[in-house]
């Protein structure tokens, strides 16, 4: 049985999985987000210049969040490393190539090293001020403004979707409502939760989404199709 040209190209799916881990501190819980990034090529083509000489195949791209979870306050970091390692062995995560992305901003490199030593090979992110992400010897320095702007744009376009039955889905919506943009007298923009509120779930989403959309970290070949 022959396969139509359109059906063959519609079925091409890039399927990548990420786990974002915002490492908690004394007064902030850690938070974990599973993000699934998939992209499907469509049979239609579009012009990429005014003259119409260059064409590109159209696609649809989504970032689904099937799991969000807060980790209890004061969980020992060694215990947390073991919990994350076991979590990644749970189906369907064990069936996919997973990138673990950790925010080591407040806890420092020694905690990131624990994940490295456990063989988890995390993408290590330190959240900074500024406007541009920078590659460092042991990870990335990424401005908070970039992380939040990325979430906002993907939500606005409808590409970022949180499952209705996801743990803490209501909590992350509340965090989004409590998140505020602040502009200093010097004109610098910062993003923070309201006093007494948390942003751990948002940041676990933000670092996973940033890694998923950071094209400089992609390999040339897509991960295996489903």
Image (spheres, helix red, strand yellow):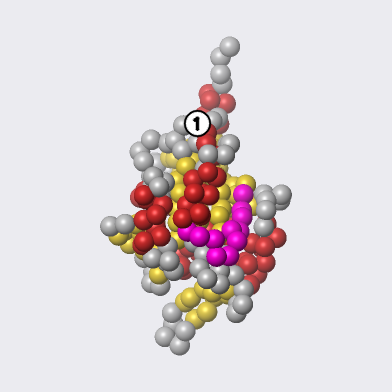
Say if the magenta span includes residue 74.
yes
Which residue is drawn at the image coordinates 55% and 45% (left, top)?
A: 87
Image quadrant assignment for residue 109: bottom left
Which residue is drawn at the image coordinates 39% and 54% (left, top)?
A: 114
Find residue 37 and report its horizontal and vertical position in percent: 52, 44
Is residue 156 visible to us here? no
Is residue 184 visible to us here? yes
Relative to 64, 187 lies left or right: left
Q: Which residues are magenta?
A: 67-77
Find residue 147 and report its horizontal and vertical position in percent: 48, 62
Classify 10 Å Cα crowding around label 1: few (below 14), some (14-19), many (20 and above). few
Quarter occupied by the C terminus: top right
In the rendered image, the vertical position of residue 139 relative to residue 3, given as above or below: below
Which residue has dot 1 on it? Answer: 225
Depth check: 64 or 170 in front? 170
Find residue 120 and report its horizontal and vertical position in percent: 41, 46
Of all residues, the one furthest to the bottom in this rendering is 185
């Amino acid at each position: 049985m022959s396969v139509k040209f359109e059906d063959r190209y519609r079925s091409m799916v890039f399927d990548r999985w990420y786990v974002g881990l915002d490492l908690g501190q004394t007064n902030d819980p850690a938070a974990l987000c599973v993000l699934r990034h998939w992209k499907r090529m469509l049979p239609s083509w579009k012009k990429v210049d005014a003259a119409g000489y260059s064409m590109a195949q159209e696609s649809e791209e989504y970032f689904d969040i099937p799991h969000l979870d807060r980790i209890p306050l004061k969980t020992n970091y060694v215990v947390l490393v073991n919990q994350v390692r076991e979590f990644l062995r749970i189906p369907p995560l064990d069936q996919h190539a997973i990138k673990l992305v950790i925010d080591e901003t407040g806890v420092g490199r020694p905690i990131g090293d624990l994940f490295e030593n456990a063989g988890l090979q995390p993408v290590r992110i330190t959240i900074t001020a500024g406007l541009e992400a920078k590659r460092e010897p042991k990870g990335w320095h990424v401005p908070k403004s970039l992380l939040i702007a990325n979430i906002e744009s993907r939500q606005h376009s409808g590409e970022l979707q949180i499952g209705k039955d996801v743990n803490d889905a209501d909590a992350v919506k509340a965090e989004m409502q409590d998140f505020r943009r602040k502009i200093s007298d010097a004109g610098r923009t910062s993003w923070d939760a309201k006093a007494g509120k948390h942003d751990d779930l948002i940041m676990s989403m933000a670092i996973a989404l940033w890694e998923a959309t950071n094209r400089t970290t992609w390999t040339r070949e897509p991960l295996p199709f489903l």
